[in-house]
DNA sequence: TCCCGATGCAA
DNA sequence: TATTGCATCGGGA
C-alpha cells in the first residue's frame, strides 16, 4: 500500500518554533527556527515511513464556516508572533523548491483539508499518515489512516491508528468528537457543557456513546447535577460537537499525481538554504544530488579536486623546505592577523600544488618566505590581495596571479555584497564551508596554550580545495559571458598592484595633524560659544534633530525640506538662510571645522603605523558596482581639497626620506570616454583641439563664440557636462544650478540638440539594458541592472540613469586600472625604487626617489596616456611636491 | 552594542 | 528627483 503523508503546516511550524530553546537567526536577521524544526520533522517522516506522496495543508487568515457558526470560535487565541509569521512564506518557498504540493482553501482550516484528503486517499487504496501537533486530528484515525502526533516539540512523536487510540483513550476516534463536544476546548474557545470536565466527559461518552444519544437518554443520567447540566446545555453541546468535527467533505480537487514526491529544484533549494544558513541541509543536499542517478544535472559533475584525497604534508622544519620545490599553479591561503598598524603575524600558509596539500607552520620556520619567493609558482586564492599583503610584509616582493575567486565573482556580478568563500562554495559547489570565524568557534579558539597547527591545517585544506574547484566553475562562466578581457587583462594583474600600494602606504606626519587638531579644537570652542550665545541655550550642534529645533522652532527660521526625523539642516538648506540669521554662517563654519577634526584629524591619527609612520589604507577591488576601487581605514580617496582649510590636511601626507611625491591625474577622463563611446563629433573635435571642454560646451549650446563665454556660463555648462555623465534629469540640474525646472529642461534640450550622438548613445544604453539586463564598459565589464525593467516609475528611472552612467564611469575605471598595471610594471622593469602608493579614481601618486624623479615622471605620464586608445587623446597632468598639498 | 539616517568629504 | 564611494555622529532598537 502506498503511503501518503499529509502534514498540518501551521501546527508543525508552530510546534517547531516554540520547541526551540534558543532563537535561530541568520546574520541577515531572518528567523529560522520554525522552518528548521519543520524540515527536521519532515526529513524524519520521509526516512521512517518512506511515503510516496506528500502534501502540506495550511490555514488561511479568512474566517471559516466555524467562525460563521459561532462567533466566539478561536476567540482570544494569541496571534502568531511576527518572527514566526515571517518564517511561513519562506517555508512555503522551500516546499515549492522541493516540489511538495501545498493546499489551502478559503473558508476551511487545514484540519478539514487534511481530513478530506485522508478520506479520499483511503478510498483510493492508500495509507494516509497525518502529521500534526494538534490532538483534535485524532478523530481522523481509522484502521488505515494513522495520526502522527508530535511530542516534546517536534523531536519525538507518537503514532495512533484506530486501535491505538482506543487503547489510550478508551473510545473511538469518532467518539473523540463527542468527548470534545461535552468538555469543550479552551484553545479553540469551544464551550462544551459548563462544569463538565475530562473525567465526567469520559464517563458519559463511555456510557452513552455519543452526544446525541446522551441527550436522548438524559433522563437516565446520574448524578442529578450532571443531568441538570446536560439538560440545560444540550444545544451548546450539539454546537460544540459541530465545531469540533473536522469536515471531510471539503469541495476541493484532489489529484494525487500532484502529491507525488519527486526531485527537488536543487538550485532553488541551495539558494534558500544558503540564505538561511542551513549548512547541514546543504551538505545533505550535496550527497543526495551527487548520489542521485542520472538526473542529468550538469552541476553534478565531479569536482577537480577532492580535498580529502590529497596527500597531506605538514612542513614544520626548515630542513623539509630544503628538499622541496614547487612549480605551477598553487592554491594558497595565508593565516595571519590582518593588521595594518604593525607587521602582521603569520601563523601558517596552506597550499595545494598538484595532488599534494602542504601546510607550512610559519611559527617554526625561519627560511620559509625566502624559500617561497624562489618557487616558480602562480597563485590561486580567494581575496589574494590579503595573502599578498601579509607576504609582502615578510619580504616577498613578486607575485604571479593565476586566479582569485573573489575577484572573479566580482567580475561576474559586481552587485553582490557577499563574496565570501563560504557563500560561493555553497552556490557553485553545493558544499558547505565554514568561514574562518565559524571554524575556529567550532574547533576551539586558538590561544597561547594550544597548538593551532592541526586546526589551521585542516581548515586550510578545505579552503584551498574549495578555491581550486570554484575557480574551475567560474572560469567556464567567465568564458560564457565574455569577461576574459576584464578579468585577465585588468582585474587579476591588478591584485598585486593593490597589495603593493597597501604595503607601501602613505607616509603621514602625525605632528602636523596634531597641530592642526589643536587649531581646529580652538575654533570649535570659539564657534560653540558664539552659537550657544545666539541660540540662547546650550545644545548639541552635531545633532540635526536638536539643531533643527533651535533653528526652525525657537528662532523661527523658514524651514525648507523635511527629513524622516524632522527638519533638514543640510548645508544647501542652511546656505539659503545665510542672511536670515547670524547663527547660520556660524553653524556652517562649525560643521566644516568639526568635520575636519573628527574625520580627518582624530580619525586619521590612530591609523598611522607606529612602526613606519605610514597609513596603510585598505584598497578594495570588489566593492563598487561600476568597477572603481574603494578605500577604507582611512579612506584616502576623500581627503579634502576643494576648500583651502581642508586642503591644508594634505600637508600631512608626505614622501619618504630622500623622496618626492609625483602624481598625475587624467584630464576629463569621463567626458573623453563619453566622446569616444558616443562618437560625438563636436566633443571629439573639442578634445582634439585641446579646447577648454566646459567653455566649448557652453559656446555650442548657447550659440556664441568661446571667447564671449562668461565664467557663469562656463560653470553652468560644466554642471551640464556632469549631469550628462550622471544621466541627468531636469529636476536634478535645476536644483544643482538653482534655476527653474523649466530652464533646466530647456538647457538639456539645447545640449542634446548640439550633441545628438550623445543623446543617441544614452538612448542606446537604456535600450540595450532593457533588452539584456546589463550594460558594458570598454573592457567588457558588465553591470546587471535589475531596476531597468521595474514596474515602479521611480525605480525604472533610477535603472535608466545607472544604465547611462555605468558605461562611462566603469570605462574610466577600466582605463586607470590598465594604467596602474602598466605603471607598476614599468617601475619594476626599469629597476626603480619608486612605488605607486595611491589611486584616486583619475589620479595616481608615486612615492618617488629623488634620483628617479625624471624617469618616473616620464613613465607615469606616458603609461597613463597610452593605457587605452580612444578616439580622443588621453591627457594626464603631472604634479610633484614635498607633500600631497603641493600636488596641484 | 549594533544599526540606520543625516551629513559631508572625494572623484 | 544626478553617479560611485566611506566616516562620523546621534539616537533608537
Image (cartoon, coloured by chain):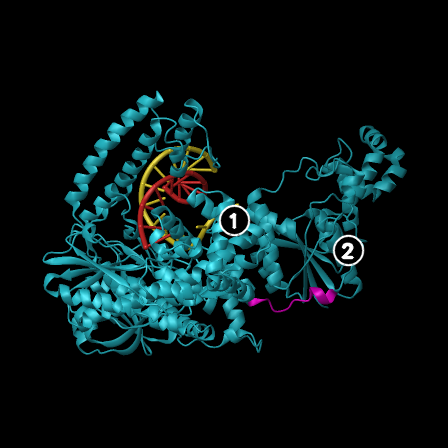
Chain colours: A cyan, B red, C yellow
Q: Is residue A713 magenta?
A: no
Q: Considering depth in this image, is A875 or A615 the residue closer to the camera?
A: A875
Q: Which residues are magenta?
A: A256-266
Q: Is residue A397 at all visible to an observer of this figure?
A: no
Which residue occupies 57% across, 43% down? A82
Q: Residues within 10 Å of mark 1 (few under 14, many from 20)?
A: many
> Dividing the picture into quarters, in which one does residue A363 lie?
bottom left
Q: Residue at left 76%, top 43%?
A: A244
Query: Percent x, y for residue A495?
Result: 30, 66
Q: Earlier in the sequence, mark 1 or mark 2?
A: 1
Nearer the viewer's eye, disc 1 or disc 2? 1
- Please rate how many residues cluster around mark 2, counting C-alpha atoms within 10 Å: few if below 14, some from 14 to 19, many from 20: many
Q: In the depicted view, which residue is nearer to us: A88 or A879?
A: A879
Q: CA distance from mark 1 to mark 2?
A: 33 Å
Position of A641 with respect to A64 (left or right) is: left
Chain letter of the residue beneath label 2 in the structure image: A
Residue most extreme to the top: A536
Helix, strand or loop for disc 1: loop
In the foreground, A205 or B5: B5
Q: Is residue A215 left or right of residue A80?
A: right
Chain letter of the residue carrying label 1: A
Magenta stretch contains residue A260 = yes
Number of marks: 2
In this rendering, is residue A774 above or below A703? below
Is residue A235 visible in this depiction of the protein? yes
Whether labels 1 and 2 share one chain: yes
Instruction: Place residue A643 in its image quadrant.
Output: top left
The residue wearing badge 2 is A116
Amino acid at each position: 500500500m502506498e503511503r501518503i503523508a499529509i502534514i498540518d503546516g501551521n501546527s508543525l511550524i508552530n510546534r517547531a518554533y516554540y520547541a526551540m530553546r534558543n532563537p535561530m537567526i541568520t546574520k541577515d536577521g531572518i528567523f529560522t527556527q520554525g522552518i528548521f524544526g519543520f524540515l527536521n520533522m519532515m526529513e524524519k517522516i520521509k526516512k521512517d515511513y518512506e511515503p510516496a506522496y506528500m502534501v502540506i495543508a495550511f490555514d488561511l487568515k479568512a474566517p471559516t464556516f466555524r467562525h460563521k457558526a459561532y462567533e466566539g470560535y478561536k476567540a482570544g487565541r494569541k496571534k502568531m508572533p511576527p518572527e514566526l509569521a515571517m518564517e511561513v512564506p519562506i517555508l512555503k518557498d522551500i516546499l515549492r523548491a522541493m516540489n511538495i504540493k501545498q493546499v489551502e482553501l478559503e473558508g476551511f482550516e487545514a484540519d478539514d483539508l487534511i481530513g478530506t484528503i485522508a478520506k479520499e486517499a483511503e478510498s483510493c487504496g492508500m495509507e494516509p499518515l497525518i502529521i500534526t501537533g494538534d490532538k483534535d486530528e485524532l478523530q481522523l484515525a481509522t484502521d488505515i489512516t494513522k495520526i502522527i502526533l508530535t511530542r516534546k516539540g517536534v523531536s519525538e512523536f507518537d503514532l495512533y491508528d484506530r486501535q491505538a487510540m482506543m487503547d489510550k483513550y478508551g473510545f473511538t476516534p469518532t467518539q473523540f468528537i463527542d468527548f470534545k463536544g461535552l468538555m469543550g476546548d479552551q484553545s479553540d474557545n469551544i464551550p462544551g457543557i459548563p462544569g463538565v470536565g475530562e473525567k465526567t466527559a469520559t464517563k458519559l461518552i463511555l456510557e452513552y456513546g455519543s452526544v446525541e444519544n446522551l441527550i436522548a437518554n438524559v433522563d437516565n443520567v446520574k448524578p442529578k447535577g450532571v443531568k441538570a447540566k446536560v439538560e440545560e446545555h444540550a444545544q451548546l453541546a450539539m454546537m460544540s460537537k459541530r465545531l469540533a468535527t473536522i469536515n471531510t467533505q471539503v469541495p476541493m480537487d484532489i489529484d494525487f499525481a500532484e502529491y507525488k514526491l519527486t526531485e527537488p529544484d536543487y538550485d532553488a533549494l541551495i539558494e534558500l538554504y544558503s540564505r538561511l544558513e542551513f549548512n547541514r541541509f546543504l551538505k545533505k543536499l550535496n550527497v543526495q544530488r551527487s548520489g542521485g542517478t542520472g538526473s542529468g544535472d550538469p552541476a553534478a559533475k565531479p569536482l577537480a579536486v577532492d580535498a580529502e584525497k590529497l596527500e597531506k604534508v605538514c612542513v614544520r622544519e626548515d630542513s623539509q623546505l630544503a628538499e622541496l620545490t614547487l612549480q605551477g599553479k598553487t592554491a594558497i591561503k595565508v593565516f595571519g592577523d590582518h593588521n595594518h598598524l604593525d607587521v602582521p603575524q603569520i601563523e601558517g600558509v596552506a597550499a595545494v600544488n598538484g595532488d599534494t596539500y602542504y601546510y607550512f607552520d610559519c611559527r617554526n620556520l625561519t627560511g620559509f618566505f625566502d624559500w617561497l619567493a624562489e618557487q616558480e609558482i602562480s597563485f590561486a586564492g580567494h581575496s589574494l590581495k590579503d595573502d599578498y599583503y601579509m607576504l609582502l610584509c615578510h619580504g616577498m616582493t613578486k607575485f604571479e596571479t593565476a586566479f582569485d575567486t573573489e575577484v572573479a565573482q566580482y567580475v561576474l556580478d559586481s552587485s553582490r555584497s557577499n563574496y565570501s568563500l563560504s557563500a560561493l562554495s555553497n552556490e557553485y559547489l553545493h558544499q558547505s564551508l565554514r568561514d574562518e570565524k565559524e571554524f575556529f568557534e567550532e574547533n576551539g579558539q586558538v590561544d597561547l596554550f594550544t597548538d593551532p597547527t592541526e586546526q589551521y591545517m585542516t581548515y586550510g585544506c578545505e579552503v584551498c580545495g574549495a578555491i581550486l574547484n570554484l575557480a574551475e566553475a567560474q572560469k567556464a562562466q567567465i568564458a560564457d559571458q565574455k569577461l576574459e578581457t576584464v578579468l585577465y587583462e585588468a582585474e587579476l594583474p591588478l591584485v598585486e598592484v593593490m597589495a603593493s600600494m597597501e604595503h607601501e602606504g602613505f607616509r603621514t606626519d602625525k605632528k602636523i595633524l596634531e597641530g592642526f587638531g589643536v587649531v581646529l579644537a580652538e575654533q570649535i570652542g570659539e564657534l560653540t560659544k558664539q552659537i550657544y550665545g545666539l541660540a540662547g541655550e546650550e545644545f548639541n550642534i552635531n545633532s540635526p534633530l536638536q539643531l533643527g529645533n533651535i533653528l526652525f522652532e525657537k528662532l523661527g527660521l523658514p524651514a525648507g525640506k523635511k527629513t524622516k526625523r524632522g527638519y533638514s539642516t543640510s548645508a544647501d538648506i542652511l546656505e539659503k538662510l545665510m542672511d536670515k540669521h547670524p547663527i547660520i554662517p556660524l553653524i556652517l563654519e562649525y560643521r566644516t571645522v568639526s568635520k575636519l577634526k573628527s574625520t580627518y584629524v582624530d580619525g586619521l591619527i590612530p591609523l598611522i603605523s607606529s612602526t613606519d609612520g605610514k597609513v596603510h589604507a585598505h584598497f578594495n577591488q570588489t566593492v563598487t558596482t561600476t568597477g572603481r576601487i574603494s578605500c577604507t581605514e582611512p579612506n584616502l580617496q576623500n581627503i579634502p581639497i576643494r576648500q583651502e582649510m581642508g586642503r591644508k590636511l594634505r600637508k600631512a601626507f608626505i614622501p619618504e626620506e630622500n623622496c618626492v611625491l609625483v602624481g598625475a591625474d587624467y584630464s576629463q577622463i569621463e567626458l573623453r570616454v563619453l566622446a569616444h563611446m558616443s562618437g560625438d563629433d563636436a566633443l571629439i573635435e573639442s578634445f582634439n583641439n585641446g579646447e577648454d571642454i566646459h567653455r566649448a560646451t557652453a559656446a555650442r549650446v548657447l550659440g556664441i563664440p568661446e571667447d564671449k563665454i562668461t565664467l557663469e556660463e562656463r560653470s553652468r555648462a560644466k554642471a551640464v557636462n556632469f549631469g550628462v555623465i550622471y544621466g541627468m534629469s531636469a529636476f536634478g540640474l535645476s536644483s544643482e544650478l538653482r534655476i527653474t525646472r523649466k530652464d533646466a529642461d530647456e538647457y538639456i534640450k539645447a545640449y542634446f540638440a548640439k550633441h545628438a550622438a550623445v543623446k543617441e548613445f544614452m538612448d542606446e544604453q537604456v535600450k540595450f539594458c532593457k533588452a539584456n539586463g546589463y550594460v558594458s564598459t570598454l573592457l567588457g565589464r558588465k553591470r546587471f541592472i535589475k531596476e531597468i525593467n521595474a514596474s515602479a516609475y521611480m525605480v525604472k528611472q533610477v535603472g535608466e540613469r545607472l544604465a547611462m552612467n555605468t558605461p562611462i564611469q566603469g570605462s574610466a575605471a577600466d582605463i586607470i586600472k590598465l594604467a596602474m598595471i602598466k605603471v607598476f610594471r614599468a617601475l619594476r622593469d626599469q629597476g626603480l625604487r619608486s612605488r605607486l602608493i595611491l589611486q584616486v579614481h583619475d589620479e595616481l601618486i608615486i612615492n618617488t626617489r629623488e634620483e628617479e624623479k625624471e624617469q618616473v615622471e616620464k613613465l607615469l605620464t606616458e603609461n597613463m596616456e597610452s593605457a587605452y586608445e580612444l578616439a580622443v587623446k588621453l591627457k594626464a597632468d603631472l604634479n610633484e611636491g614635498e607633500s600631497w598639498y603641493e600636488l596641484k
